[in-house]
Image: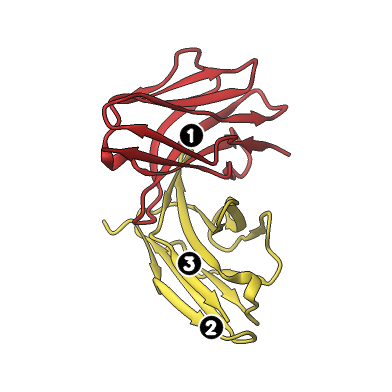
Amino acid sequence: NAGVTQTPKFQVLKTGQSMTLQCAQDMNHNSMYWYRQDPGMGLRLIYYSASEGTTDKGEVPNGYNVSRLNKREFSLRLESAAPSQTSVYFCASRSGLEQYFGPGTRLTVT
Amino acid sequence: AQTVTQSQPEMSVQEAETVTLSCTYDTSESNYYLFWYKQPPSRQMILVIRQEAYKQQNATENRFSVNFQKAAKSFSLKISDSQLGDTAMYFCAYVNQGGSEKLVFGKGTKLTVNP
């Protein structure tokens, strides 16, 4: 079991560029989540998906879109990147009340 | 909305000693769970310990234990016999039982274990 995988691990974008962060889990979990982590802010929920075909906004959804492609995959898209989106992004999936996290993607927007 | 507060941005402890990290939370719910996550320099989020609100007994996992005070809405983490590998960010988190099970995190405490 690979658990939760994320690609890429690092990315540098210029302001206005777009990109998609990929997340996949092989644990057959229904719920998946996207968080961002900023210094001194902890982890904040961007979007989540309770099941395949459903998505909902979290605490900080502005500037992001998500797609729950199937049960395994949950992608996060930045349509027009801004310096304020420089952060570390974590994907997670849930079994019961425990969330399993991916290794994170460090994104820098210049 | 639920909130989680960690009032100690940074702490340090000598190897083999004991340290306690503080966490308070605010909720009007009665059924919920609390967690402590560890994030070492590798960035991986690792679940350290969990506590069900309906259980009066404090959870323990080897060197890690919690002091759960439901009336005071307090959930502190005690690390005994601290080891160099315990150096990490520690996050307290809350989730309601039922609903979408969205975790709410505190801002974290950076713990350094000194040799």
Amino acid at circle 3: Asn
Q: Closer to us: mark 3 or mark 1? A: 1
- In the image, taking residue A22 as reference, residue B41 lies left or right, namely left
Q: x, y percentage for residue A37? A: 54, 57
Give the chain of mark 1.
Answer: B
The label shown at residue A13 is 2
Q: Quadrant of the C terminus of chain B?
A: top left
In the rendered structure, the answer to whether residue A9 lies left or right of residue A110 reads left
Q: What is the chain letter for disc 2?
A: A
Of labels 1 and 2, the one closer to you: 2
Q: In this rendering, do the residues under marks 3 and 1 share a single chain?
A: no
Residue at image location 44% in from the left, 30% down from the top: B50
In the visual, does B89 lie left or right of B61? right
Looking at the picture, which amino acid does disc 1 mark? Phe
Circle 3 SS class: loop
Between the C-alphas of marks 3 and 1, the distance is: 29 Å
Q: Residue at x 38, y 41 (%)?
A: B112
Q: Secondary structure at mark 1?
A: strand
The residues bearing labels 1 and 2 have C-alpha atoms spaced at a distance of 34 Å
Residue A63: x and y in percent read: 68, 72
Q: Identify the mark at residue B35; answer none if there is no mark.
A: 1
Q: Residues within 10 Å of mark 3 (few under 14, many from 20)?
A: few
- Residue A70, disc: 3
Who's red, chain-wise? Answer: B
Q: Nearer the viewer, residue A61 or A16?
A: A16
Residue A43, compared with residue A21, is above or below; it is above
Closer to the camera: disc 2 or disc 3?
Answer: 2
Q: Quadrant of residue B28?
A: top right
Q: Amino acid at mark 2?
A: Leu
* Chain yellow in the figure, letter: A
